[in-house]
C-alpha cells in the first residue's frame, strides 16, 4: 500500500473528469479520494450536490467511475445523507467509504446497518473525526471500521487550508491507546506536515492542494513516498 492518496474536490462532473485525468496518468497512483460536500454538514457544496441529475443519469446509463481496472476510489462523505450516498457511490464502483462521526446521530446503529446491507460487497469503511472533536466519538466503534481518518484542518470541505497542528496531539494519544488501528490524515498535508504525521504512525496521507498545484505530480508523489514507514494499511 502506498503512503499517498490524492484528493479531488469536484465542482462539476467535467471538473471531476479533468482532475481524475491528471492523477490517473501517474502509474504510482492507485487510489484516489473524491471529496463529497453537501453544503449542509460542510460547505461550500460540491459535485454531485451541485448537479443532482448527474448521478441518476450515470446510474441509468450504467456508467462507472473511470479506470476501475487500476484505481481504487475512496469517497469522503461530508454529508448528512451518508446512507443514501453510500449506495450511490458503491454502485459507481467506489470501494472505500469514509463517514464523518459528527454527521451521524447514532454511529453504532449506522455502521451496523452498513455492515448488514453491504457485508457481501468488497467495501472498506472508515470514520473521520474533526480536529476539535473528542476521541470518545469514535472509540466505541473501532471494531466496526477498518481505519480512522483524522482531519488536519479546522474547517472541512475546502482545500488549500493550513495544517492545524492540534491534530498531532490527538493522533499521538489515539495511537498510544490503539496502536493497531490504521490511521490516515486528510487536510493540510504537505511534505513538512507529512514527516511529523508518518513519525506518529499515520500510514495513509490524503493529499489535495500539495499535489494539485505541483508541476510534476509524479515527482511530488515520489517525495512523499520516501517518508514511507513499516506502518501499513
Image (tube, helix red, strand yellow):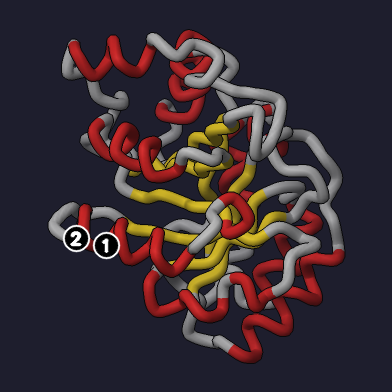
Query: Which residue does the image show at 55% across and 35% down from the upper left?
Result: 35
Viewer-side residue, 42 vs 163: 42
> Between marks 2 and 1, how big is the CA–CA gap?
5 Å
Question: Number of numbered discs present?
Answer: 2
Q: Image quarter for residue 157?
A: top right
Q: Quadrant of the C terminus?
A: bottom left
Query: On the rendered structure, is 9 left or right of 83?
Result: right
Residue 109 image point, x, y percent = 39, 65
Residue 57 image point, x, y percent = 28, 10
Residue matched to label 2: 119
Eyeballing the image, is 105 above or below 54?
below
Query: On the rendered structure, is 90 left or right of 186?
Result: left
Find numbered disc 2 in the image and state the secondary structure of the residue it sits on.
loop
Query: Which residue does the image show at 50% across and 52% down from the upper left?
Result: 99
How packed is label 2: few (under 14 Cα within 10 Å), some, or many (20 or more)?
few
Q: Is residue 107 visible?
A: yes
Query: Which residue does the image show at 48% across and 29% down from the upper left?
Result: 23
Viewer-side residue, 62 vs 22: 62
* Cβ–Cβ under 8 Å for marks 2 and 1: yes
Query: On the rendered structure, is 201 left or right of 60?
Result: right
How packed is label 1: few (under 14 Cα within 10 Å), some, or many (20 or more)?
some
Eyeballing the image, is 208 above or below 25?
below
Find numbered disc 1 in the image and state the secondary structure of the residue it sits on.
helix
Eyeballing the image, is 56 above or below 27?
above
Q: Quadrant of the N terminus?
A: bottom left
Q: Which mark is residue 142?
A: none
Residue matched to label 1: 115
Residue 226 image point, x, y percent = 60, 60
Q: Image quarter for residue 75?
A: top left
Amino acid at each position: 500500500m502506498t503512503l499517498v492518496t490524492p484528493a479531488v474536490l469536484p465542482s462539476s462532473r467535467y471538473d471531476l473528469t479533468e482532475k481524475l485525468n491528471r492523477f490517473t496518468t501517474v502509474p504510482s497512483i492507485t487510489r484516489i479520494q473524491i471529496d463529497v460536500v453537501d453544503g449542509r454538514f460542510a460547505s461550500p457544496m460540491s459535485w454531485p450536490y451541485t448537479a443532482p441529475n448527474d448521478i441518476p443519469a450515470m446510474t441509468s446509463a450504467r456508467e462507472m467511475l473511470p479506470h476501475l481496472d487500476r484505481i481504487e476510489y475512496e469517497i469522503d462523505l461530508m454529508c448528512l445523507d451518508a446512507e443514501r450516498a453510500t449506495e450511490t457511490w458503491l454502485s459507481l464502483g467506489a470501494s472505500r467509504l469514509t463517514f464523518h462521526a459528527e454527521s451521524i446521530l447514532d454511529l453504532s446503529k449506522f455502521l451496523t446497518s452498513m455492515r448488514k446491507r453491504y457485508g457481501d460487497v468488497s467495501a472498506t469503511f472508515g470514520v473521520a473525526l474533526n480536529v476539535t472533536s473528542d476521541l470518545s466519538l469514535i472509540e466505541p466503534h473501532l471494531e466496526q471500521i477498518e481505519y480512522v481518518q483524522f482531519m488536519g484542518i479546522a474547517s472541512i470541505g475546502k482545500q488549500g487550508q493550513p495544517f492545524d497542528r492540534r491534530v498531532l496531539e490527538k493522533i499521538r494519544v489515539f495511537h498510544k491507546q490503539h496502536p493497531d488501528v490504521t490511521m490516515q490524515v486528510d487536510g493540510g498535508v504537505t511534505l513538512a506536515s507529512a514527516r511529523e504525521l508518518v513519525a506518529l504512525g499515520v500510514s495513509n496521507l490524503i493529499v489535495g492542494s500539495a499535489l494539485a498545484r505541483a508541476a510534476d505530480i509524479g515527482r511530488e508523489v515520489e517525495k512523499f513516498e520516501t517518508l514511507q514507514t513499516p506502518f501499513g494499511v
